[in-house]
Amino acid sequence: MVFSSISFLLYFLPVVLIVYYIFSFCRPVQNIWLFIASLVFYAWGEPVYVVLLIASIMINYFLGLFEQRWRDKNEKLAKIGIVIACVVNLGILFVFKYLTFILTTVNDFAGMEVVKVSAITLPIGISFFTFQALSYVIDIYRKDTEAQKNPLYVGLYVAFFPQLIAGPIVRYKTIAEQINNRKTTADLFTTGTTRFAVGISKKVLLANNLAVVSDTIFRLTQTTKEYYSVPVTMAWLGAVCYMLQIYMDFSAYSDMAIGLGQMFGFQFEENFNYPYITKSIGEFWRRWHISLGTWFKEYVYFPLGGSRTKSKDKMVRNLLVVWVLTGVWHGAYWTFVFWGIYNLIFIIIERVIGFEKIEGHDVAKHIYSLVVIMFGWVMFRADTLYELNEYFGNMFGLTNNAFYNARVGMFLKEYALVFFFAILFSMPVAKICRKKVEEMENSAARIALKSLYVVGLLSMFTLSVICMVKGGYNPFIYFNF
Amino acid sequence: MKNMEKYIFTVFFVAGLGIYSIASMVNAKNELSKFPSKLKGQNGDEIKETISELDATMGENVAASHGVIETYGLITKLLGKNEVNGFEYVKDKNGYLSLGNFWNEVYDVDEKALALDVERFYEKLQKNNTKMLFVSFPQKVSEKWTEGYSGIPYDDFSYRTNQFMIQARRYRIPNVDLAKTFNESDKSYEDLFFKTDYLWTSNGAFLGFHTIVDKIEDMGIDIDPDGFYRNLDNYEKIHYENMMLGSAGRSVGLIYAGGAENFDLYYTDRNEKYKCVLDEKETLNGNVKETLIDFTIPDAVTENKNGIYNRSLYDMYMSGIKSEMNIENENKKDGPKVLMITDPFALPITSWMAPMCSELDFMWACKHSQESIERKIASKDYDLVIIGLYPNDMNADYIHFTKEK
């Protein structure tokens, strides 16, 4: 089930909200209801793999209790528990996500079928919920939190539907208190509804339309130059579109997840902070998919020693581990590995030359960052290294392609509004406007502008629902992870 | 109150969503009630498929869906867009809708191999003294009529069709290229094609029919010796004003499509008696109005305000496309036995050709395997096999007569 679907918006969400608030007098029932609803949500798309989710919850529940028992009494046993938690959780992830890739690579290197490879379907959201479940056990071991005695509450933490299939990756210690003692206020609820509406509008009106352009251009590239010659400008347009699409798609999902959480009284941490206003790649990764970056920092980078190692070589090694893992987390393809290393190279260079400390040259730094990020996204989007080579070749006129064709002008004309608003909302325009409106002394003007906000948001939400009813292109990039 | 605007928004959000949700649930309740019993005894993959169907059913049965589609069309029109819904449909300067297609410039179809497949099929038929005719139906998008917007990806398969017909002529396959017929005619675009559908009008279809029958006569089959059926004056004509909304129009809405179109129905009625078997399930017996022409459709269109979205008057011919149809003409036992392996373009032609044949069988090419086509050929002594395809359908999904798809 996806948030931008009729089944979610008109069936699932109203029913879950109504029952949740009917039981306002009883928090345990509310929590159990949310857990059951989350299982239904997951089973809707994965009626078989919901068993895997439940198994993961139970295993990590018992491991959590195990860690709680032994972390003070027997360090060795506690460490064994952590090793088991890592092996089980990462093992599940490995089997479903990476095994086929590894076996195919072995066969490719051998030049023959050394091992029989069967396609294994990737359960939706497996990368997200296994990382969440693993962080639960590790946080208990580290004494950052206490084990949850109620398995249904562990289930709620792992499987909570707003963030189950595309994050943000929520660490248990940030949410433990909220499971039992959250306050559902009108203020929080209204913040949630507006956030959700913003998210769904970004997804349906911007991300989906950008996807039409970028996916068409990437698919035309996949046919190769023997069948279709993608002109230079079209290749650049596709790259820019994808850059905007992935931000709108993913940040919209996070907006919806955070908004939904707020409707149920939960407060999740932000997952994006206007990443495209960045002035360095290092800064970009502090603004993009913040929850994933934080997870790797807390559970991989810092345990390896982080930046506080005596040897700079070790720091580079630690960064290499994190960035290879970051790439691989996104998918079992060589393009993701190279994408991770590509980001690492720029991060290291920036650290070595103290790039972020350089004063001034903001425009140049901004342009540099966007160009590097854009090329990174092309790498990220390409299915194979061959396609990546073809795409870059098209971008730089190396495939005997033309500079321009009528399709490019047509895309720009037909999607002008989409491009305009996607670029506009990639910047903190709304945030700045809101602040300025609040500071206005003229109350009539303030009320008028706030009314405009209400009308605007209602219109966008209504238009989104219209588009959903009409039915159209509705991909979700991060569902592949 | 601080953040008053969020409270106001929330009231509208909750009220609006609540009302629309209840209305949609009520609208869909009959369809949704069928699902619980479906889920019983199913395995994992079947459950997944059923849930997918349930999801689709929820989407298709929302309240006021036609009003929503019209609103979408209105907004698209106001924005001045020449494409709808991610290039699902595109418009030309005269308001003619066609499918959007970026792939007709990707020349990855082996037309020679397809033509060879047809040629081998032709040779097989010749061994049984069965004649064969390949008909290339005309395409709505053409240089002659389409005033397109720059860069818009119209569904233009001219290049591929031309390449195929060159190969067909090389292999000496008897053929009729209706695109050529249409280009040479003095009829207007409006006369020949629907604005809101990719299909041809009855006038366009009759021009095609006339050309096909002329060719059949040239091939030595006396199918219309006195030219009766090639004279439109001998046909009953019924004009339906503003009652036709084609597949494209139903998808984009009346507002974007520019309104409904007229539909002219043509048929002959010389008191023939037919037996018509549809998909080996339903058998119709009677005259032309009880078998070949479905007169319930105009009532279905007018019975409620959304009727025009649910039925197309083009389906009056043969009650719309079926996987297989078998027609016996009891009044023409000495007429030729004809098999048509074709697509929806052939529906009017089928209803006009049936009076001239003793038996006329129809197979929707993409719904049959090579084996099933072979079985059909072997089941009767056909005098003529007509393969009729629309340019979009000149691919391996439709052309697999001597090897599987």
Image: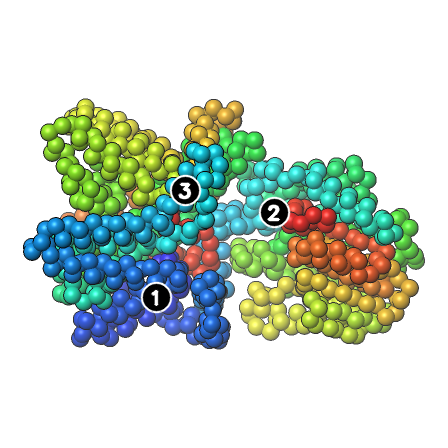
Instruction: Say the numbered circle drawn on residue A103.
Output: 3
Q: Earlier in the sequence, mark 3 or mark 1?
A: 1
Residue A307, horizontal then vertical, whole percent: 14, 33
Is the Cβ of the residue at disc 2 closer than 8 Å to that at disc 3?
A: no
Look at the numbered disc 3 and give the secondary structure of its residue.
Answer: helix
Q: Is residue A271 left or right of residue B310?
A: left
Q: Amino acid at mark 1?
A: Val
Q: Which residue is mark 1?
A: A40
Q: CA distance from mark 2 to mark 3?
A: 56 Å
Q: CA distance from mark 1 to mark 2?
A: 49 Å
Crowdedness near tag 3: few (<14), some (14–19) or many (≥20) residues, C-alpha within 10 Å? some
Residue B315, horizontal then vertical, whole percent: 67, 64
Which of the two marks, 2 or 3, is nearer to us in this view?
Answer: 3
**Residue B182 in view here:** no
Look at the numbered disc 1 and give the secondary structure of its residue.
Answer: helix
Which of the two marks, 1 or 2, is nearer to us in this view?
Answer: 1
Residue lying furthest right: B226
Q: Amino acid at mark 2?
A: Asn
Look at the numbered disc 2 and give the secondary structure of its residue.
Answer: loop
Instruction: Say the numbered circle drawn on residue B94.
Output: 2
